[in-house]
Amino acid sequence: MLATGTESLLRQAREVGAEELGRFCARVSALLQAEDWGPDALDALRRLFLIVAATKYSRRLEPTCVALLQTTLCSPRCPERLQLLCAAVLREMAPSDSLSLSCDHAQSSRQLGLVASVLLAQGDPQQVRTVGQCVIKVLESRQPEGPSLTYLLPVVSKVTSLAPDALPEEQTKALSKRLGDWLRYASVQQGAAHASGGFFSTPRTRQPGPVTEVDGTVATDFFTVLSTGQRFTEDQRLNVQAFSMLRAWLLQGGPARPGAADADIGEEPVLSAASTASHLLPPAEWLREKALEYCQRLLEQSGRRALRKANSDLQKACLVEAVLVLDVLCRQDPSFLYRALPCVRALRTRLCGDTACVRALLPIAQFFLHHGEAAAVDADAVCQHLFTRIPSEHFHSPMLAFEFVQFCRDHLVLFGSNLDLLRTSFPNLFKFLAWSSPALTSEFVALLPVLVDAGTAVEMLHLLLDLPSLTAALDLQLRASQAASERPLWDVSVRAPGCLEALRDPQAQGLFQHLLRAKASGTVESRLTPLHQLLQPLASCARVLQCAQAVPTLLRAFFAAVTQFASGALASQLALLLLERSDSLFQVEGYEADVHRVLSSQFPALCKLHPPLVVERAKELLEFVGSLGGPRSTGHMLTSVVWAIGEYLSVSWDRRCSAEQISRFFEALEALLFEVTQSRPSAALPKCPPQVITVLMTTLTKLASRSQDLIPRVSLLLSKMRTLAQSPAVGPVHGEDDLGAVRTRATELLNLLKMPSVAQFVLTPSVEVSQPRYHRDCNTALPLALDTVSRLLEREAGLLPG
């Protein structure tokens, strides 16, 4: 979260208008033109960078200012900090038509790196190739006293990521050779200290000592990124940079590039230090060989006990990168597998009991997913341990949560026929989602279509609806943990001593265990209301509120996936679940209304998918309608359920539909309509919206058109509704617009019922009539039928067209 001062500066920068920006550019131009490169220029460039970087759209700077920024960037006398700021401002303006920069303008490798960063930001493919050629020429220089190359390797990495084919094959091989040299043969002595310049400085200068390991011992093997010292040499810095770009180079710009051959090039061949037979290796194989040795050395160094926390964190990061590089090497050359496998196996054994290095288990699992079959390793067992342990114990780590979900998304193809492992682990995966819902919602929207199938759909829908209560349960679990120093931050304004006691209550433990289960159990727990009551004090936590806001989006993604494969039986199960859970949700502010809006749109969709479910679930639907009334009679779910009854309770959709069933539904809906229209609004009983009343009237009319004995009864009811809507007593309660909608609908339905056969055609069209052509064809369209009925009922028009 940004500090208040930072937010204020960003707000001020965004509010700078074009006129004010023009005046400020004039001031910057005056400073740069006078070569006044003191604190005023530094402060002005900082402010200019903030202004151009604070908005999503490009700012337009004065041409004079842009030209002076480029001149200052290429000036050999300008301080480095000002040049860094000039390059940053020019990058933020990209793409720009007013640039006249060229790599030829650079006076040093540092300037070349800055100029190249600006040119690459323009996104021009030809420019990318030109920059790559220029930088490679400098890198090919072999003079030890030449310009520093540490500024240029990041440029090469960027070039290969933007255009993998930007570098010719010969140059690619040459750089692969040099990367291998930097990785393996960097100096093992620390860098020399700068002389103080005093009279005794030269005689008293201490010779640089050897680099050390992270545990303080003197290094006995070659230099790596995990080697420590007071000062570092140029080749040691190149060693670190070479490792940082190694994986990207192997994947994009190095030996793995399609069409790149390992033929000898016109430079002196290098003897492999690892080859006892002294074989001559081509550059690509040389780089792979040195990369393997480097990664094996890092795995050995990662087992040492670091003296400083910073080095301990670096060890963990290097573990992840080293295993990822080994995976790439073994995929590019399977012969490396037998040499890398013992290291990775030993590493996995060591890390399985080390909670501090849990992130490294993800690349290890990836390694075995790629190579498990060739290495005779059960990758499923590795992943099983991963999916069981990590989400349960580390759901509160946001970085690990994102990486874990990305791991699942990136390796769906590798799971192959074993997707059941991923699908049955969704309760554990949802713990990441419940705890970090704002960051992971889009990730899970993409992952849900893979996670859900016919076997897990019902259980998954229950858990999605219970996601806010899962967040509260996880919060409570952390509050009850004994290691106070390891607890992540939570909303300290919420006190929940009663919840902590409930967590230890044997009667509630079963519900908690079900909610916090690690795998799909195949069963659902419908008695969660007591658990919701226990967790209610946590409903106002910010994390719970954020999770509740994400659920509607997740529900839409879930139903979009389910409707692609759902059978009639599954659609019927899900429809019943919606009825049951509509009044059994965790009471979070605004949550029930948001969820009801989604469920109300999905219930008709399920009915459309399997129309007979209205007849199959007649008992449950009657119970649902009979239990409505009071505050529940104003919701979205009521409207969608009543509409679905009127649409699909028909012989045309299910031959099992009987007149007796229609009569039972008619009586239940008639009683409900009477209740919602006769009740007076109050604080506990809000006003019934006109949509509910009109849908109830329409559904009753539809049912009467299918069982014509009910027509007199519904006609009387509609007449009463029309009279009631005209009554002055209800005007102040519902409003004139609402009453007008009720009157209009009642009149339309009464007119239809005057001709029962036409009413049945209009209100219960056959499946053929529901086809789109009946709504487009001017000769058969439904509006034509309604227009005909209106004309027949108008005494003045008679039967003559007019």
Image: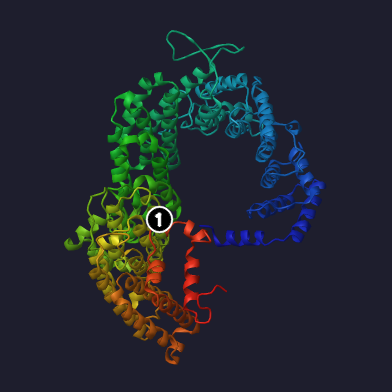
Residue closest to the far left: 506
Q: Is residue 724 left or right of residue 510?
A: right
Residue matched to label 1:
554
Decide which of 194, 760 is in the foreground and name it.
Answer: 760
> What residue do we see at 69% from left, 37% from top?
119
Decide which of 467, 640 is in the foreground and name it.
Answer: 640
Estimate the x, y position of residue 76 in percent, counting from the top left: 76, 36
**Measured along the vertical axis of the image, is residue 307 above or below residue 402?**
above
Estimate the x, y position of residue 89 in percent, counting from the top left: 69, 47
Q: Is residue 327 visible?
A: yes
> What residue do we see at 30% from left, 50% from top?
567
Q: Is residue 74 left or right of residue 639?
A: right
> What residue do we see at 72% from left, 44% from top?
96
Estimate the x, y position of residue 584 in percent, counting from the top left: 29, 66
Residue 358, quarter of picture: top left
Tag 1 secondary structure: helix
Estimate the x, y position of residue 53 in percent, counting from the top left: 64, 52
**Measured along the vertical axis of the image, is residue 801 above or below residue 122?**
below
| Image quarter in which the C terminus is found | bottom right
**Measured along the vertical axis of the image, is residue 399 above or below residue 9?**
above
- The figure's colour scheme reads rainbow
Q: Is residue 581 left or right of residue 775?
A: left
